[in-house]
Image (cartoon, helix red, strand yellow):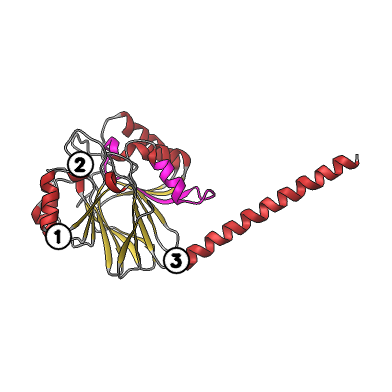
Amino acid sequence: MLKNKNKNKKRIYVVLVVLVMVNVLAWVAVWEVGQSEDLEVVFFDVGQGDSIFIEAKNGFQVLIDGGPGLAVLEKLGAEMPFYDRTIDLIILTHPDRDHLFGLLEVLKRYKVKSILWTGVIKDTSDWREWERLIKDEGANIIIAQADQRIDLADDIYMIIHYPFESLEGQEVEYANDTSVVAELVFNEVSFLFVGDISEKIEKQLNIDSDVLKIAHHGSKYSSSSDFLEKVSPELAVISVGENTYGHPDSGVLQTLEEFGINILTTQDWGDIRIVSDGTFFKLINKQ
């Protein structure tokens, strides 16, 4: 009888210790978020696809696209504390598999507060699963349209530049040119995310930005000289993996070099992590 009581006391003690440790860890995480003055943008290495994680200094989290497989789950697990199972905003630039598939798995495992996408129809199994999951999620659905502003923190926000008008309910075969174009702004520093748009859409945009996510994995049909001259980025990031398309195109790389733009690819660098204080940005490579 005495042994059982001692065992019970030990179990209670262990449980209390664990609870205290979890509470301490949670408060440390909250303190760290409160102390941060930076914006962090991570271009995940998910192979031949796109997935970008953004965390504002107040802890607001955005995931743009999910890549072609399950790698995004491992990446999120490394970025987010184990107890954090909520993402504030998911953006699907367009419903092609190399941007969409990973988001299906994210929706099954995380609580998502808001989802921004174009609402276009692409009759594939991935798209049908996406439609089902976002209805079940109960998130706030935002149909992307130019001039929308999304505040992440007091001085950090996103502006949607394209599509110019709602595409909701429109059926598309070639989804690349329906891609959401979004600019992330933190005081004097901005990042431009352009999905897979082609030169046709680039011609209609007039945006200056410091960091440019190169369209369509460095395809020869994007990143025209005129567009690069308008954006005039200091850094270009190319999300790319092993592929049979010739991405990134040698002509695109040459044009970037001619403009004196620094180039990083996820295929060479792995995850590309950029931190900004609103005045400057810097690359932090954890490799």
Indicate which disc, 1 or 2, sits on the residue closer to the N terminus: 2
Q: Residue at x 62, y 59 (%)?
A: 24
Residue 197 horizontal/vertical position (percent)? 18, 46
Q: What residue type is disc 3 on?
A: Ser
Residue 180 horizontal/vertical position (percent)? 25, 49
Residue, disc 3: 36
Residue, disc 2: 176
Q: Of the residues tagged 3 and 2, which is closer to the observer?
A: 3
How far apart, in angstroms, are the residues tagged by discs 3 and 2?
Answer: 36 Å
Indicate which disc, 3 or 1, sits on the residue closer to the N terminus: 3
* Quadrant in which the N terminus is drawn: top right
Q: Quadrant of residue 28?
A: bottom right
Please tell me whether mark 3 sits on a helix, a strand or a loop: loop
Residue, disc 1: 260
Q: What residue type is disc 2 on?
A: Asn
Q: Which residues are magenta?
A: 72-98
Residue 195 horizontal/vertical position (percent)? 24, 47
Does 82 appear in magenta?
yes
Please tell me whether mark 2 sits on a helix, a strand or a loop: helix
Q: Is residue 286 above or below residue 174?
A: below
Question: Is there a contact, CB below 8 Å, between mark 1 and mark 2?
Answer: no
